[in-house]
Image: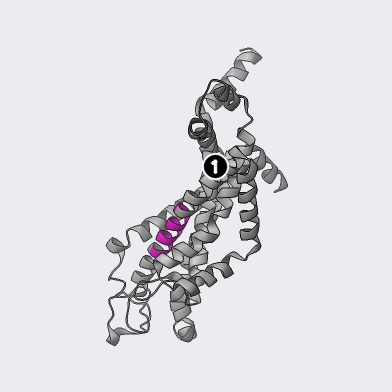
Amino acid sequence: MSLEGVASVRVMPEVRRGLWGAAWHGYARNPVRVVAAAAALLIVAASAFAPLLAPTRYDFATIEESLQQPSSRHWLGTDAIGRDVLSRLLYGGRTSLEVALAVVALAMLAGVPLGIAAGFAGGWIDYLVVRLIEVSTALPALLLAMLLISILGSGVGNVILALAVVAWIEPCRLMRAQALALRNRDFVEAAWALGASAGHLVWRHILPNTLGPLIVVITLTIPRMIFAEASLSFLGLGINDPLPSLGKMVSESVSYMQVYPVLGIAPTLMIALMVLTLTLVGDGLRDAMDPARGQRVGGLR
């Protein structure tokens, strides 16, 4: 076989694979991130199906069984008022995921249009959006969320709103940069010359070419919001009783850690595993969708 034939055999699979296939191939080459993805999927599934998997409801309490050690009846023991720790752990993970996904959805609804408008339209719109990003970035995110919750009050809805106020910055900055890079590309200028409207250009040419980076930002924002919600709940500014929260479970266990350490260790490990696995998935997607970056990081290792 000639050298050209060998080259064609090696190149054709890469061509057939496509953008998403190549990204998956690049992601799957790292076994650590594959394990992280499997672990993240398992944690998310267990939290999502908490009503089916939990031994009891999260608010079911039996005072006579309070502060029990792990046993066959209560795998992770019970808390100070007799609630099953495993059940509250699963429901707490579900609460964290619901809050994080809602925050990311609101952040995308606000940040993506603002970023595209700033990058594509330019002018005074870009100036105002950039100034707003600079002001928002100058404020510590967690402190701003705490201030908003202290004004609005605690609760699921207010936590989601407070975190969304600080989470829109990253998608907005990303979409502005993507729109600035794409608006002068040949295919956009060609569509503009053929009479395409601004809405058509954004919907058919700008947005489809930003999906890869946007998915990476979403994947990396979710664990950040899980940790932020847990931090707020630990400080008593997040989820209200009886709805469980991992951060609140850690806070409630402080008085019993020396005698019943599982009360604090279990939710802490849950938070750590959720944040770690989802962050590794996000990092893996970022490297897979940017082969040049992946090669640079691999070279440094």
Judging from the image, what secondary structure is the residue with disc 1 in? helix
Name the spot of residue 75 as percent of width and height, x first: 35, 73
| Residue positioned 61% across, 55% down in the render | 132
Q: Quadrant of residue 154?
A: bottom left
Name the spot of residue 107 as percent of width and height, x first: 49, 53
The relative height of residue 130 versus residue 294 in the rendered view (above or below) is below
What residue is shown with label 1?
27
Q: Amino acid at mark 1?
A: Tyr
Name the spot of residue 255 as percent of width and height, x first: 47, 86
Q: Closer to the camera, 75 or 107?
A: 107
Graded by Cα atoms within 10 Å as few (under 14), some (14 to 19) or many (20 or more), the crowding at tag 1 reads many
Query: Is residue 29 at all visible to an observer of this figure?
Result: no
Specify start and end residues of the magenta stretch as a single range: 95-105
Residue 104 magenta-drawn?
A: yes
Query: Is residue 210 at all visible to an observer of this figure?
Result: yes
Residue 252 magenta-drawn?
A: no
